[in-house]
Amino acid sequence: MSLFDLRRIGGRIGAEVMGVDLSSELSDAVFRQIHDAFLEHKVLFFRDQDITDAHQLAFAARFGPLTAPHPMMRTIDGTPQVIPVDGEDQRADHWHTDVSFTTAPSLGTSLRSVVLPPYGGDTMVANAAAGYRDLPAELRAIADGLWAVHTNHAEQPRLGTERGEKVREAFLARRFEAAHPVVRVHPESGEPSLFLGGFAQWLVGMTPRESRPIIDVLQSYVRRPENTARWSWRPGDVLIFDNRATQHYAVNDYDRHQRVLHRVSVDGDVPVGLDGKRSYALREGE
């Protein structure tokens, strides 16, 4: 028996959870159903939540140990697990998976609305497992054997502001590179997905120039409209997505208005490919 209601956002990704109060301590039975929905729908949305950073931390911690601190981004004073995602700092208007340039990218990311612009600023999430399923058999056979190098020295847009430049410099001050299988096997569901995104810059054994057309073709299947969910933020909104099977994109269409979300991430494991081989580091913050 379901202990809350679910409203699917789309046919392939996303569901809104209704009837759950994240300011309360969730029972084990309720959380098991939330976790099952998380694996199935890849991203869960919660409306009308009156919660604090502490509540958000407690909820995210049910999925696993929390990440603290982020290797480059600033955090809330006294709460290193909370990152203020502020449009004055940077705008992640590119498809990516959080910290995929590390050997063990995060399991999942929770976002909570704090300050919203009068228009725009939606978040889009794409189902990378559906993207893999959509591949023609011939292209899937190629993808199955590929590995990609992910680095933080990639797709860091310039805001043209002094504060934005300082954040960008801090993000690029240390260089991370990790080699991951292009097709990753989900550690819980066993589902394969395309593990790419904007931090994937070249394929192992190829030059960046040789790699780019292949990466772009594979990426095009992940970000097909039918494989994406788009969320328009309202006060009190919370979401959590599975970084092991998704990519996301922050829509940069709110001009110079303020937009602040609080982000909490859950530690992940080392990705594994179809052949059982594990990701490995090339550079770790040099």
Image (spheres, rainbow, N blue to C red):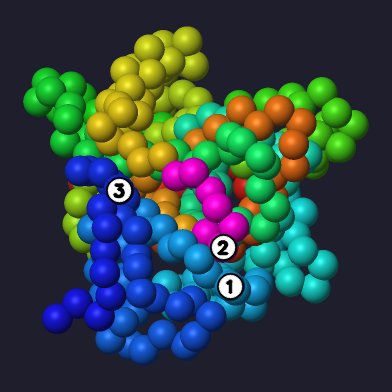
Q: Which residue is mark 1?
A: 50
Magenta-tinted stretch: 231-237
First along the sequence among labels 1 and 3? 3
Q: Which amino acid is tagged 1?
A: Asp
Residue 192 in sight: yes
Assess whether residue 169 is covered by the magenta stretch.
Answer: no
Quadrant occupied by the C terminus: top right
Q: Residues within 10 Å of mark 2 (few under 14, many from 20)?
A: some
The alpha-carbon separation of the residues under discs 3 and 2 comes to 18 Å
Q: Which residue is mark 2?
A: 236
- x then y, percent, for residue 117: 67, 42
Q: Residue at x 81, y 34 (%)?
A: 164
- x then y, percent, for residue 56: 57, 72
Q: Residue at x 35, y 29 (%)?
A: 223
Q: Residue at x 66, y 32 (%)?
A: 254
Q: In terms of depth relative to the viewer, which is nearer, 8 or 58?
A: 8
Q: Residues within 10 Å of mark 1 (few under 14, many from 20)?
A: few
**Of all residues shown, which one is farthest toward the left?**
137
Residue 156 in sight: no
Residue 127 sits in quarter: top left
- x then y, percent, for residue 86: 72, 46
Horizontal arrangement in the rendering, residue 44 relative to residue 74 (left or right): left
User: In the picture shown, does residue 259 fall above or below 50?
Assistant: above
- Our reading of the magenta stretch's main secondary structure is loop
Residue 142 sits in quarter: top left
Which element type, helix, strand or loop, lies under badge 1? loop
Q: Which mark is residue 9?
A: 3
Q: In terms of depth relative to the viewer, which is nearer, 244 or 143?
A: 244
First along the sequence among labels 2 and 1? 1
